Image (spheres, helix red, strand yellow):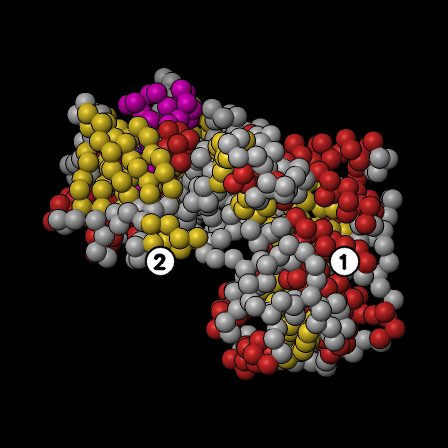
Amino acid sequence: MNGTGRPGDNQLGESTGDVRVGVYVCHCGGNISDVVDVKALAGLMAEYPHVAVAKEYPFMCSDPGQEIILEDIRANRVNRVVVASCSPTLHETTFRRALQRGGLNPYLYEHVNIREQVSWVHKDDHAAATRKALALVRAGVEKATRLDPLEALRVKAERRVAVIGGGPAGMSAALALAGAGLPVDLFEKGPALGGRLLEMGRVFPTGEEATALARRLAEDVAAQGSIRVHLGGEITRVDGYVGNFEVRVEEGGSQARVKAGALVLATGFDHYLPGAGEFGSGDAARVATLPEFQKALGSLPAGKVLRWRGREIRHLAFLHCVGSRQAEGLNPPQADGKVNDYCSRVCCTAALHAASQVLDRFPGTQVYDCHKDIRTYGRGHEAYYEDAAKKGALFFRYAEDALPEYLPASGLLPARLKFRDVLTWMEEVEVPADLLVLATGVVPRAIKGLVESLKLPVGADRFLQEAHPKLRPVEVANNGIFLAGTCQAPMTLDEACAAAGAAAAKAAQLLSQAEISLDPFVVELKAERCTGCGKCLEECSYSGALKLVDRPLAGLGATPPGPEGLSAAVIAVNEALCKGCGACVAVCEPRALELAGWHLDQFEAMAGAIAAS
Amino acid sequence: MGQAAVVDPELLKAGQGNGKKILILTTLASSYPGANAVGQARLSYSPDTYIFRVPDPVMFPDDFYLQCFDKGFGGILVMSSGSDCPYEGAYQRLSARIARVYLKMKEKGISTRRLKLTTICTVCRAAFLKEIAEMRKAVAGE
Ligand SMILES: Cc1cc2nc3c(=O)[nH]c(=O)nc-3n(C[C@H](O)[C@H](O)[C@H](O)COP(=O)(O)OP(=O)(O)OC[C@H]3O[C@@H](n4cnc5c(N)ncnc54)[C@H](O)[C@@H]3O)c2cc1C
Ligand code: SF4
Ligand code: SF4
Ligand code: SF4
């Protein structure tokens, strides 16, 4: 065993003076130890430089497992900890907390994944798996010896949330926030709250009038004294960072500035607008989009046959996936050169809901449904398909490799939709369509100004992108900004409201204290090394995170100290604006910039340890 | 739980030998969870692979790659988050950086097949395995 200190500029902060690493190898109840020789691994690690103790245990994450670490911190003066176990995404926080309980800085911890990335993927070669685990744990120790204690960043926060977008998601978020005791500013650019609900007829799954739903939500908002509603204004800019955002809005000719600690984006979606002539679009008497049809349907008087713009509609055809699930080479590209290859998720159910209403109210109208496949996902939504089928709708499934063709009415022939039908072994079918309803999809709303001023991440599908689809589904990478509803992806009303609730809960949690605690993994500056070259400024996409400032040479801490009275341009870091991407680190030759917790010398040493294994 | 693995100590002492090892740089947001997904599905790949996780590989300067080759790594796979990258402009900067590293590799006579920039998401299991298989071939000089 070895417990000698190592030279270097990392501070221990934990008073012992020596770097003493504790290494703990977990069996994971056989998940690891059936493949990796954990006893041999711990035995070999005990001899590795700077390792004070190396142990193996059946379940390191259990209370007795964590107690072993705490005991070694107390009795063996361990001041760096490496646990080799499952993925850090599962238990890194568990072990950091254990260090904290033992009085150690939680960031003096390194997690080595020998389950998902060793024992589970190399189960047929125990020797190779054990050798790989050994190399990885050695690399983990190399990193651990170079870790610095870190403190979470603290930022004073404005206890108020700005919600942008007054549709169902924005209103739900505002109500949830107000319910959590937070004052809210709700910005809606239109003349009234309600979003797309104001343009819709009856909505699934309740069959309720969308406008009634919008009214109910808007009344609830109005009844909340703590929600300030800004209608009809245009947001011209949003600046700032977590805890300290500023929204500038032009309202009735004057500029207002609103401060907020967090932002909830609920800017919603746009309907896909078919191009001129796309599936007959433009022939308003014979072709309608689903939103147009859904809105009008409620007010059409019931009768034997549906009437549309003065004409009897004996044959009504729905065409699915218009503007969604497009394929390159088949569909013309959108303005950005890409096709909309995603599924809009709501149009199948909305189309069948409409079909079902037609069949109930206009028994003399035959309904044809032409789809790629039916995606009525969601609890109870399959019933819309069964219901429409039972009531007599005829279903066709058009081949994916060729677009259906709209044939306009000619002579005695009515307008028709022509395609090859998968359900009848690719037979060519022509379906009469006195009215063709295009189930147009959901596209991202153009919010370029917000995207640019807040540097919002946008996905390949052009919707706003969450930080992680499973682990951080309503947060973006930018701290303090949350996503509610269809600005993120196509979703139904219940999903949009659920996302809004999650976004509100996250924002409320963030602002629950006067100061916000932030992950410390942002850029660190060693000002005395900075030559003022400015290369890092060109690399950083986040304005204000880095800036060149004049500093007195004497105060820079350089050796030897600079003369009194002279100053030099050096970089200054605004930790709250830095996103921790590390782009600037790569170009800073004198290594004045490093990413806290992810120093380059740590990775160089890790690579060295692996290469030497 | 099955039988605990016991490996002949001589096999462990032998080390893995240089020149074959592949370093894989992954991102916290995408490719690291992607590599975990491969393990969760109990798929397998070459054990000569070593995964580092970082917020984004854009943090590594050009020299980092060259030093890794000097140290004896056979190949480096940079598994970025591509267009799913949560950091503005980072993917473009990373690809520009890798393009510069290629030039430096050529100057030093290192085969550019030994470095590859790819995009791997949280569920790209097949792509992850394919990239490793291809890099193994490149490292073996096939
Ligand atoms: C054809 C069709 C039929 C549908 N039918 C159903 C159904 O029957 N049942 C169902 O559950 N779901 C249905 N949906 C889905 C439903 O419409 C959405 O889930 C819902 O509208 C999402 O609400 P939202 O608040 O996210 O967005 P929106 O309703 O689009 O509201 C966003 C609001 O933000 C405002 N805004 C945008 N940008 C700004 C800005 N910069 N500043 C200020 N304000 C801004 C907009 O003016 C708008 O009021 C359907 C969707 C489609 C396309
Ligand atoms: S929900 Fe249905 S109609 Fe809409 S894009 Fe998906 S498959 Fe096509
Ligand atoms: S921090 Fe580095 S890159 Fe930025 S100005 Fe200083 S020396 Fe140049
Ligand atoms: S780490 Fe990224 S966000 Fe932070 S200052 Fe550097 S380039 Fe900017």
- In the picture of the structure, the residue carrying the numbered disc 1 is A610
- Compared with A324, B16 (above or below) is below
Element assignment for label 2: loop
User: On the rendered structure, is A31 left or right of B65?
Assistant: left
For the residue pair A482 and A561, the one nearer the viewer reads as A561
* Label 1 crowd bin: few (<14), some (14–19), many (20+), radius 10 Å: many
Can you say which quadrant of the picture contains the N terminus of chain A?
A: bottom right
Q: Is residue A183 above or below residue A111?
A: above
Would you say residue A211 sits in the magenta stretch?
Answer: no
Look at the image and say whether residue A281 sits in the magenta stretch: yes
Magenta region: A266-291
* Residue that appears at 85% across and 54% down: B18
Tell me if residue A232 can be seen: yes
x, y percent for residue A457:
46, 39
Q: Is residue A83 left or right of residue A431?
A: right
Tell me which amino acid carries mark 1: Ile
Q: Which mark is residue A379?
A: 2
Above or below, A119 against A271 in this view is below
Residue found at the far top of this picture: A411
Q: Residue at x 77, y 31 (%)?
A: B103
Q: Residue at x 50, y 71 (%)?
A: A103
Question: Is residue A500 visible to us here?
Answer: no
Q: How many marks?
A: 2
Mark 1: secondary structure? helix
Q: How far apart are the two marked residues, 1 and 2, measured between alpha carbons?
A: 50 Å
Farthest residue in the front direction?
Answer: A564
Amino acid type, label 2:
Arg
Chain to which mark 2 belongs:
A
- Examine the image and state in which quarter residue A188 appears: top left
